[in-house]
Amino acid sequence: MYHSRDSSGSLITILILVGVLLLLSLIQGCSSSTAYNNGICPYCGGAYQFKETVGHRYSTHYIYVCNKCGNLIESSTYFNPPGKNN
């Protein structure tokens, strides 16, 4: 005997997964902003300088280095240097 599969359960599962992925993306964006700290290194007070862009298959990351202590952060968000509005 043929039993039809309830598609509402699959739809709910897909919606939950999409919600979780959006939440994780939002959290990652917030953590990038916190690490960048408005361009000020939390260890020595120096300024972060953009160093390079690293492209991966499905994403792009931006590398910033402190001009005093050399602390390095990698972010999925590009931050404009202070004073620039591009």
Image (tube, rainbow, N blue to C red):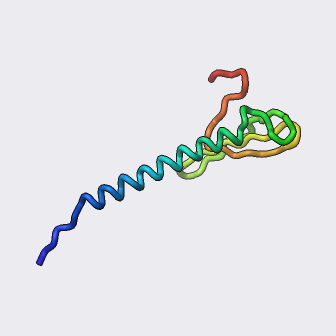
Residue 75 picture location, percent across and down: 66, 44
Left or right: 60 as drawn, with respect to 17? right
Left or right: 42 as drawn, with respect to 62? right
Residue 36 picture location, percent across and down: 71, 38
Q: Residue at x 53, y 46 (%)?
A: 25
Q: Residue at x 15, y 72 (%)?
A: 3
Residue 45 picture location, percent across and down: 85, 35
Q: Residue at x 77, y 35 (%)?
A: 49
> How many labels sit on residues?
0
Q: Nearer the viewer, residue 46 or 86?
A: 46
In the picture, the quarter occupied by the N terminus is bottom left
Residue 29 picture location, percent across and down: 59, 42
Res. 76 image quadrant? top right
Q: Residue at x 64, y 44 (%)?
A: 31
In the picture, the quarter occupied by the C terminus is top right
Left or right: 41 as drawn, with respect to 4? right
- Picture layout, residue 80 above or below residue 63: above
Left or right: 58 as drawn, with respect to 86? left
In this view, the residue farthest toward the bottom is: 1
